Image (tube, helix red, strand yellow):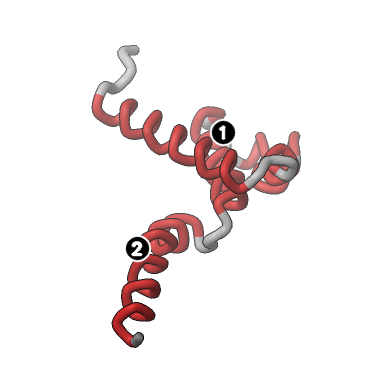
Amino acid sequence: MRYLASVLVAIQLVALGPLYYFYGQVDPCRALAKEIAVRAEAAGGIGNTIEDALGDLEVNARKDVADQSTGECVGQLFANWTDRAAEEVKPKKK
């Protein structure tokens, strides 16, 4: 029984550890909102000016993903990760 409990805890750590490490939370929808906010800020390139004009980017992103299910958030989060990985492997030409 202890072995089964240990395996379940290990699976949870492997599954949720990266979310907590990268985003400081284990909720996929909040992690997706944070990812969207970070990417929007990086794409804008002007940082605080965007937040002054539009408000807190993460709060706005949370409003955008609030009506999505956990599964949809996980799917979009993985899509964002694969997009980011593809950009790093094949950088955009200027």
Which quadrant of the structure image shows residue 68?
Answer: top right
Q: Position of residue 39 (x, y in %)?
A: 51, 36
Q: Is residue 63 left or right of residue 49?
A: right
Q: Report the residue at 66% width, 36% height from top.
A: 49
Q: Position of residue 92 (x, y in %)?
A: 33, 17
Looking at the rendered image, the disc whose residue lies closer to the viewer, 2 or 1, is 2
Camera-nearest residue between 81 and 67: 67
> In this rendering, is residue 74 above or below 22?
above
Q: Report the residue at 33% width, 87% height from top.
A: 2
> In this rendering, is residue 22 above or below 42?
below
Q: Position of residue 26 (x, y in %)?
A: 53, 61
Q: Which mark is residue 53?
A: none
Quick one: SS at disc 1?
Answer: helix
Q: Is residue 79 left or right of residue 90?
A: right
Location of mark 2 (residue): 14
Which quadrant of the structure image shows residue 10?
Answer: bottom left
* Residue at far bottom of view: 2
Q: Is residue 83 left or right of residue 59?
A: left
Q: Report the residue at 36% width, 66% height from top.
A: 11
Mark 2 / mark 1, whichever is N-terminal: 2
Name the amino acid, label 1: Ala
Name the amino acid, label 2: Val
> In this rendering, is residue 71 above or below 93?
below
* Residue at far front of view: 1
Camera-nearest residue between 86 and 67: 67
Q: Position of residue 54 (x, y in %)?
A: 74, 36
In the rendered structure, are the residues bearing label 2 and label 1 in contact, judged by CB atoms less than 8 Å apart?
Answer: no
Location of mark 1 (residue): 40
Q: How many marks?
A: 2
Q: Residues within 10 Å of mark 2 (few under 14, many from 20)?
A: few
